[in-house]
Image (cartoon, grey):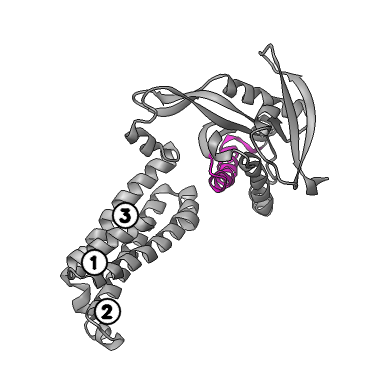
Amino acid sequence: MLVAGLLSGIFIYSIFAPAIANFILGLLIGIQAYIYIFSFEQFVKPRLAKRNFFLALSTSTLAYITVIVISVFISLIFINQFRVTDVLKNFRNILMSDAMIMGVSFGLLLSLLFNTYSMFEMLLGKHFLLKLFTGRYHKPFEEERAFMFLDLKSSTTLAEKLGHKVFMNLLNDFFYDVSQAVNETKGEIYKYVGDEAIITWKMKKIKNKSLPVDCFFMIRKLVDENKQKYIKRYGLVPDFKAGLHGGKVVSGEMGYVKKEIAFLGDVMNTTSRIESLCNELNKHLIISDALLLELKLPQKYIREHLGENPLRGKQKTVSISAIQLLDDN
C-alpha cells in the first residue's frame, strides 16, 4: 500500500508541479488506488482466472488503467481547482491532455508489472519469483517446516463415475476452495500430485498457533458453503482427508528448464504415511504429536490421542492424534 502511494505521489509531483501538496495528494490517491486494486486481486481476479486466465489478465489491465485515469481526473480537479461544471466543459481537453496520456501510460506500466508478477505467482506458486531473484534457495539449506498432505477420498471411484474430464473440473473447483483457505492461513501450496495437494508453512510462522489445523477446517467450511454448487455440477460433495507433520527439511532450487523450489527429507515421507492412515483409522485429520507440541489449539478443537502407530516403510512408530471440531460431536 505504501509503495503504491509513494509511486503515485512521485508521479503526481513530477508531472503536475513539484509541490508537497501534490505529493501528498498523489500519496492519498495511490493508497486509495491500492485498496481498489487489492480488492480486485483478492475477490474478482481469482474467480475470473478460475475460468479463463486471459480474461483475468485483460480485466485486471482494464481495472488498473481505470483506477489511474480516475486518479488523474481527481488530481486535475484538485490542482486546477475545477468545479464539476468546469470538468464537464473541459472533459474532452482533459481526456486528451498530456497529463492524462502520461497517466494512462503509467497505468499500463503498472498493470504490466503487476500482471506479470501475478501471472508467475499463479503459475509457479506464492512468492516464487521473490525466492528466485533473491537467491535464497539457490544453495540447499535446512529449515523447519510443517506440511499437510490433503487428498480427496475415493478419487478413483469418482473419476470412473464422472469421467476424467468432469473429474478434473471437480478437482479445479475443489482446489480453488483449498487455495482460499491456504491464503487465509498464510500457507503455500507446494504442489499438486494428481488429486492431492501438498501445503506447507514455515514453522516459525505457526509456532504456538493453529494455522495448519485452521486451514483444514476452513476448507471444510468453504466446501460446505458451496455444497449446492457441487451437487448441481457433479451430483456430489467432495470429501477429503489430510495428514499433518513437521520438522527439518532440505530446501532448494531444483531443475533447469522447469525450475521449482523443492523440499526433501523424511518429514515429507512421514507426512504422506500419516495421511494414508486416515482411511485405516476412519479419521479425516491426523496430526503427528511432534507437530502438535509446536502448535497451540483453541478450545473449539478436540484432540483424540491415537498412540504410537507403525508407518508403511518405516521402522520407527510415530505418535499421532486425530483432530475434530467440538461442534462435530
Three-letter amino acid code of the residue under disc 1: Ile
Q: Nearer the viewer, mark 2 or mark 1?
A: 1
Asked whether the residues under the numbered discs 3 and 2 touch, taking CB atoms below 8 Å apart as contact, a structural biologist would say: no
Quadrant of the rendered image containing residue 321? top right
Lateral position of residue 162 relative to residue 112, left or right: right
Q: Residue 322, percent across and down? A: 75, 33
Q: Quadrant of the C terminus?
A: top right
Tag shown at residue 164: none
Q: Is residue 320 left or right of residue 16?
A: right
In the rendered image of this protein, does residue 313 appear above or below residue 171? above
Few, some or many residues within 10 Å of mark 3 (<14, 14–19, 20+): many
Which of discs 3 and 2 lies nearer the camera? The answer is 2
Using the rendered view, name the quadrant where residue 134 is placed.
Answer: top left
Q: Which mark is residue 77?
A: 2
Q: Amino acid at mark 3?
A: Ser
How far apart are the two marked residues, 3 and 1, measured between alpha carbons?
18 Å
Sequence-wise first label, 2 or 1: 1
Dot 2, crowdedness within 10 Å: few (<14), some or many (≥20)? some
Which span is picked out in magenta?
A: 162-187
Crowding around mark 1 (Cα neighbors within 10 Å: few <14, some 14 to 19, many 20+) is many
Q: Secondary structure at mark 3?
A: helix
Decide: is 16 above or below 61: below
* In this view, the mark in front (3 or 1): 1
Q: Main secondary structure of the magenta part?
A: helix
Where residue 101 sits in the image (x, y, percent)?
Answer: 20, 66
Q: Which residue is mark 3?
A: 111
The kind of residue on which mark 2 rests is Ile
| Residue drawn at the location 35% of the way across and 49% of the way down | 115
Q: Which residue is mark 1?
A: 12
Residue 222 within the segment the image draws in magenta: no
Horizontal side of 28 relative to 86 (left or right) equals right
